[in-house]
Amino acid sequence: MSTTTTTTSTTLTGAADPNYIPRGPVETELLFYVPPSDGSVPFNYVEKPPEGQPQRNYNEAAHKIQVEDIRGHEDEYTLDKDAFQVLKNVRSATTYETFNSDEEIQRVFYPEVERVLLDNVPGAHRVIIFDHTIRRENPNAPRQPVHRAHSDQTDRAAEWRVRLHVPDQEEAEKLLKGRYRIINVWRPLNGPVQSSPLAFATATSVKESDLVPVEHRYPHRTGETMGVVYNPDMKWKYWSGMTNDELLFLKCSDTQPGVNKRVPHSAFKDPRTPPGARPRESIENFIQSQVKEKRSPVCPMLLLRTAFTSRPTFSCPSGGLFFTVSASFSTTNMTTASYTLTISQAVKKNHRELEGYHNAIVKSDDPDERIRFQNQFTWELVRHAVSEELIVYPAFEKYLEDGAAMAEKDRAQHQVIKEKLKLFQDMKESDPSFTPTANSLMATLSNHIKQEEEVDLVKLEDVLAKSESLALARQFDRTKMFVPTRSHPEAPSKPPFETAFGLMTAPVDRLSDLLFRKFPAESITSNPSPQGSVRSMNNERIMKE
């Protein structure tokens, strides 16, 4: 295969400045797939190959390409048309040190990625983050930038991913009948990027014949990636000087007919990179996203939760409550939280999210951003409190000898928190008491969290079988999916609820009675406490009024 040379020259302007950020079009070389000479099935081993086997059995050839800079033209590209999309000004609670620990990445970064996808990928209903890779341009780093054109998944591998990460076979089969996508979310860790930027080919310029399945052999299973055959018609792009608050979505697979499925990509050497430039460091998350095709039988509109946009203002034409769909994701064993997290892990994960929102509120200097995170903190705390009172506290009463007293103590603490939340969620950002009130609320919540995590949940886990704990976690997550975002459908511009007490009395118990009993296979147990029947009767009266 011959090497193609273009006539475009590259200007090395600014190369003497170690802080120079290369921008604009550039000519470079990429490695492209060449099939095995013996016609055998191409493969590569992810780790050390078996004795006598090569690391890979196919070849590569370098070709010169022209790479265009999309900086300033970001809005021209979409996932469905081009199989890539960009997002700017993404607020993150991560630091550089976050990415030195898989546990911290899963705790802090995974929830951020999940929310960004739900908010910015049209139709996204459920997100499963099944892997992440850190790449550092360092000879001692385990993973280097990949300077070879490739795509991360074949259609067959995407189907395998669903079956692998959704262990409930019946649910997996249902998901496979609908639309699902595999998306790679890429961002730098030490931006702006100066060296080894990422190039990607617009899907409209790539033919199916340019992509070849390659067996991706792990020690205990075999997946598939795609090698990319050189085609001079491919249009290669890059996003110059990517910063840490910029995300690149690269689609790897999509089952929707009529849209482009995947985008080939590769790191490349930019000849304009100055001596002494920062070596590139980046993270890429691999995400499986499901699309919900049907409307809820309870309300004809569903609202995806948002973390980076203004408060939504919708109305429900048929009346009734609004519900927020909140997708589950994995921070353990690369599968869904509904199946692999115990109840204590699920509750703790939610606690960490709440702490992250509070930190974002008090650390931000942007008034609009503080209000957005105030709304997000309010919504999440409401959903968390409701889910605990419907699932966790009844479990205390059912399984623990002193569970009734524990549950009532926690409910009393919730009431104090709700009253403080009511005060905070009505407060304007310009109010001098805004930050002190947020801190006071968080201090009360932190004491409650400490009691739950160090005492209550420990006692509960001690008496639960693993299967019981997993089932409770699944119910906990499911309950969060259907918590009302506000208590009255005629108040679209109001905060998520008019009164903290009203949310916990009228809508929630009524929701348990009217909604969850319609799903017997996934039912949420009614509150078995002695006060439960009294609350239900009061709620009937309130709802009728």
Image (cartoon, grey):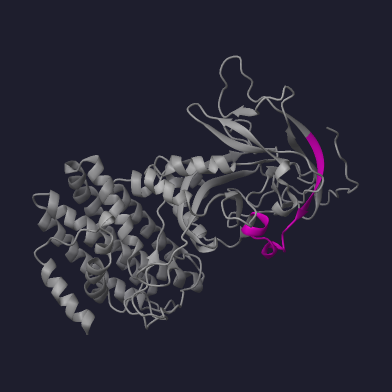
Measured along the vertical axis of the image, is residue 175 above or below residue 32? Answer: below
**Spot occupied by residue 363 in the image (x, y as percentages of width and height):** 46, 63
For this view, does 118 lie left or right of residue 470?
right
* 412 relative to 72 in the view: left or right: left
Image spot of residue 238 (x, y percent): 71, 52
Q: How many labels does the image show?
A: 0
Of residues 307 and 97, the one drawn nearer to the viewer in this rendering = 307
Q: Where is residue 522 in the image (x, y as percent from the top left)?
A: 28, 55
- Which residue in the rendered view is the most extreme toward the bottom? 545
Residue beneath the point at 27% across and 63% down: 518
Task: Find residue 282 and report its image quarter.
Answer: top right
* Above-or-below relation of 530 to 263: below
Q: In this view, does 96 lie to the left or right of 71?
A: left
Residue 298 seen by the camera? yes
Residue range highlighted in magenta: 62-83
Residue 94 seen from this side: no
* Camera-nearest residue between 66 and 375: 66
The quadrant in which the N terminus is found is top right
Does the segment drawn in magenta span residue 518?
Answer: no
> Which residue is at a point 15% across and 61% down the rendered structure image?
409
Query: Residue 468's spot in the image, x, y percent?
Result: 23, 45
Q: Is residue 373 above or below residue 153?
A: below
* Image quadrant occupied by the C terminus: bottom left
Instruction: Verify whether residue 79 appears in magenta.
Output: yes
Residue pushed farthest right? 7
- Relative to residue 246, is residue 454 depicted above or below? above
Q: Which of 488 and 493 is in front in this view?
A: 488
* Depth order, front residue of 284/364: 284
**Residue farthest toward the top in the current orientation of the protein:** 52
